[in-house]
Image (cartoon, grey):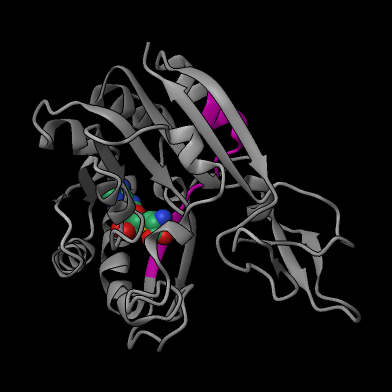
């Protein structure tokens, strides 16, 4: 990895940030690692269909955090690898996998170094997303990591929060729920967004000290173009109004266990799922 020194420092700050937040996430009800939230519940109803048969396939989960989703691939019979640059996350992910009696090879490294660190290993499936690519400064370089890790015919499945979701912010309103206003960029290109604070997106205590994190906005066009320019063949892009957790208080849980806005709200995409093959 050789980014300019500002971006290198921003990614190092992100690593410190994720290490600090990991113990809070491990103890949170949000992730439900005490067994209250099974791994499968993190997957949308369409995901297993898109991923196809995983038994005896080589699957790598990039930016796997605690391995809450990674475990589901191993349980489906895949030879599974999880990659994350947070040492705290990898330590807990290994402990959780051992407790759950599943075999997963967890590797600590920056996504941008994964081709080198995994030393020539090639995979049938790359899974990533749900809060992953917003931490990546450069999608063209990410797409070349994707092609570097895949065998010919292998697929990447990216399931990510939709830039429309990221651009909305609630304003308290009378009635059924908050009014969602367009308040943030949909398109990238303004550089890193700095966030600083002690609270994290799960329940649980505040951090003792504020950490800094950097995020990058990536519109759908940027994602698709990065993969296409790297030679990937995109065959599916789903946009869905479903989310694995209630982002706003007036969201309603449906029969799949995922959450959507009430019928009175406009139907807007909150998550997307993109599948692309290496020819
Ligand atoms: C919100 S989690 C996404 C994983 C999963 N969907 C989840 O919700 O647990 C984001 C993960 O990305 C990791 N991460 C961020 N930037 C990274 C990078 N450049 N290389 C490797 N991991 C990175 C963080 O350490 C964190 O564990």
Residue 80 picture location, percent across and down: 21, 43
Give 20 or 102, whichever is nearer the viewer. 102
Quadrant of the rendered structure where residue 37 is?
Answer: bottom left
- Would residue 267 be visible to someone looking at this image? yes
User: Which residue is depicted at the point 24% across and 32% down?
Assistant: 57
As for residue 148 lying within the magenta part, the answer is no
Quadrant where the C terminus lies? top left
User: Which residue is depicted at the point 8% across and 30% down?
Assistant: 119
Relative to 122, is 78 above or below? below
- Would residue 10 be visible to someone looking at this image? no
User: Going by the image, does 231 lie left or right of 238?
Assistant: left
Quadrant where the N terminus lies? top left
Give 88 or 55, whichever is nearer the viewer. 55
| Residue furthest out toward the top | 279
Location of ligand 1 given as a quarter of the image: bottom left
Residue 109 picture location, percent across and down: 18, 47
Residue 28 picture location, percent across and down: 39, 80
User: Which residue is depicted at the point 20% across and 37% down?
Assistant: 114
User: Going by the image, does 137 lie left or right of 247?
Assistant: left
User: Which residue is depicted at the point 34% across and 46% down?
Assistant: 7
| Residue furthest out toward the left | 119
Relative to 38, is 161 above or below? above
Residue 213 picture location, percent across and down: 40, 63
Quadrant of the rendered structure where residue 249 is?
Answer: bottom right
Question: In the rendered structure, which segment of residues is drawn in magenta?
Answer: 212-224
Count the marks.
Answer: 0
């Amino acid at each position: 990895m050789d980014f300019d020194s500002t971006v290198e420092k921003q990614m190092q700050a992100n690593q410190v940030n994720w290490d600090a937040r990991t113990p809070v996430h491990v103890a949170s009800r949000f992730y439900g690692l005490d067994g209250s939230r099974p791994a499968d519940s993190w997957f949308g109803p369409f995901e297993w269909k898109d991923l196809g048969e995983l038994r005896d396939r080589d699957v790598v989960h990039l930016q796997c955090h605690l391995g809450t989703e990674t475990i589901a691939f191993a349980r489906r019979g895949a030879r599974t690898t999880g990659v994350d640059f947070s040492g705290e996350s990898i330590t807990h992910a290994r402990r959780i996998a051992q407790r759950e009696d599943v075999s997963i090879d967890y590797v600590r490294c920056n996504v941008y170094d994964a081709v080198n660190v995994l030393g020539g290993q090639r995979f049938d499936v790359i899974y990533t997303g749900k809060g992953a690519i917003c931490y990546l400064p450069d999608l063209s370089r990410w797409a070349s990591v994707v092609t570097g890790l895949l065998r010919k015919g292998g697929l990447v499945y990216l399931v990510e929060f939709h830039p429309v979701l990221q651009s909305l912010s609630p304003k308290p309103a009378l009635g059924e729920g908050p009014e969602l206003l367009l308040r943030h960029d949909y398109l990238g290109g303004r550089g890193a967004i700095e966030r600083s604070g002690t609270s994290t997106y799960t329940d649980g205590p505040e951090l003792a000290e504020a950490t800094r994190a950097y995020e990058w906005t990536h519109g759908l066009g940027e994602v698709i173009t990065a993969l296409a320019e790297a030679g990937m063949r995109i065959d599916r892009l789903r946009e869905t109004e479903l989310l694995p957790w209630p982002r706003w208080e007036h969201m309603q849980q449906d029969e799949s266990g995922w959450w959507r806005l009430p019928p009175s709200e406009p139907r807007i995409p909150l998550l997307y799922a993109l599948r692309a093959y290496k020819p």
